[in-house]
Amino acid sequence: MIDWLCQGEPLNVLDAGCGKGEAALTFAAQGCRVAGVDLNADKLNEAQQLIGQTAHARQVSLRQDDMV
């Protein structure tokens, strides 16, 4: 499904409750630009480490915030 969504122009994706960043990384690997938001600083640190080790780090921005 992600392959189908990311066809053509790059999409801007909001990953609300991004946790460890697996979904954000999956979308970024398909060419999307991703904004990941999570309240848990520990999960965001894990996401930053995971995503930072890939070629897609520039496509993902992470932010600690409440989605309410």
Image (tube, rainbow, N blue to C red):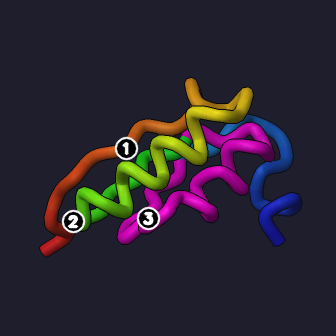
Disc 1 to disc 3, C-alpha distance: 9 Å
Residue depicted at x 36% and y 54%: 44
Image side of residue 29 versus residue 62, left or right = right
Asked whether 49 or 39 is in front, the reply is 49
Residue 66 in picture, x, y percent from top left: 15, 66
Q: Secondary structure at mark 1?
A: strand
Residue on which disc 2 sits: 39
* Residue range of the region highlighted in magenta in the rendering: 13-33
Left or right of residue 26, residue 62 in this image: left
The correct choice, above or below, for 52 with respect to 51 in the image is: above
- Closer to us: 11 or 63: 63
Residue 29 painted magenta: yes
Dot placed on the residue nearer the N-terminal end, 3 or 2? 3
Mark earlier in primary sequence (1, 3): 3
Q: Which residue is mark 3?
A: 18
Identified at 49% across, 63% down, the residue is: 20
Q: Amino acid at mark 2?
A: Leu
Rendering quarter of residue 41? bottom left
Q: Amino acid at mark 1?
A: Leu
Binning the other alpha carbons within 10 Å of mark 3 as few (below 14), some (14 to 19) or many (20 upward) gives many
User: On the image, numbered disc 1 is attached to which residue?
Assistant: 62
Tag 3: amino acid: Cys
- Categorize mark 2 by other alpha carbons within 10 Å: few (<14), some (14-19), many (20+): some
Above or below residue 38? Residue 44 is: above
The one nearer the camera, 20 or 30, is: 20
User: At 59% across and 42% down in the image, what residue appears?
Assistant: 51
Report helix, strand or loop for mark 3.
loop
